[in-house]
Image (spheres, rainbow, N blue to C red):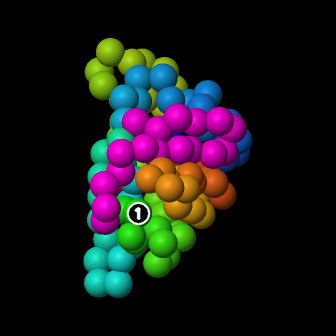
Amino acid sequence: MGDPPLSIKIEPSHIGEHLDGREFVYLITHGNERSHVVALRPTLTNNLACFANTGRTPLANVAANSSVTLTWPPCDSSQSHEHAKYSLVADGVATVHGEEIHVTITNAVFHRPA
């Protein structure tokens, strides 16, 4: 029978369909010397994730480098859908809008532990 696939591609515009049981996402931005991770709850429309209250570091990082990664951890044990034990990982291009960060998701996969 074998193990399930390590990664399963998701259409970026369909991410919202796969968020049941995923309470928050890690927004990972990249500065000059290191990455910065913050846990947030975005609003999501198709492949656009909007983040408020991100803090100064993510805003500064996105202004310098628009490439970001979003990682939704696996669901809690109350969820039993097909991909509940997978993380959902997405790459995107971010822009700063005042005090908000908007991320256009360009690529997304479910990823399970190896």
Q: Quadrant of residue 16?
A: top right
Q: In percent of the image, x 44 and y 53: which residue is there?
A: 99
Q: Position of residue 1 (x, y in %)?
A: 51, 37
Q: Which residue is mark 1?
A: 59
| Residue 4 spot, x, y in % from top left | 50, 41
Q: Which residue sits furthest top?
A: 78
Q: What residue do we see at 35% from left, 51% from top?
A: 54
In which quadrant of the rendered view does residue 32 lie? bottom left
| 15 sits left or right of 85 in the view | right
Residue at the far front in the pictured view = 98
Residue 17 in picture, x, y percent from top left: 61, 28
Image: 94 above or below 1? below
Label 1 environment density (alpha carbons within 10 Å; few <14, some 14–19, many ≥20): many
Q: Amino acid at mark 1?
A: Leu
Q: Nearer the viewer, residue 90 or 87?
A: 90
- Between residues 104 and 8, which one lies in front from this camera angle? 104
- Taking the spot 55% from the left edge, 56% from the top edge, the residue there is 97
Q: Which residues are magenta?
A: 41-57
Tell which of 27 and 91 is nearer to you: 27
Kindly tell me whether residue 58 is visible in this rendering: yes
Return the x and y of residue 106 as percentages of the image width and height.
66, 58
The magenta stretch spans residue 43: yes
Whether 80 is among the magenta residues is no
SS type, badge 1: helix
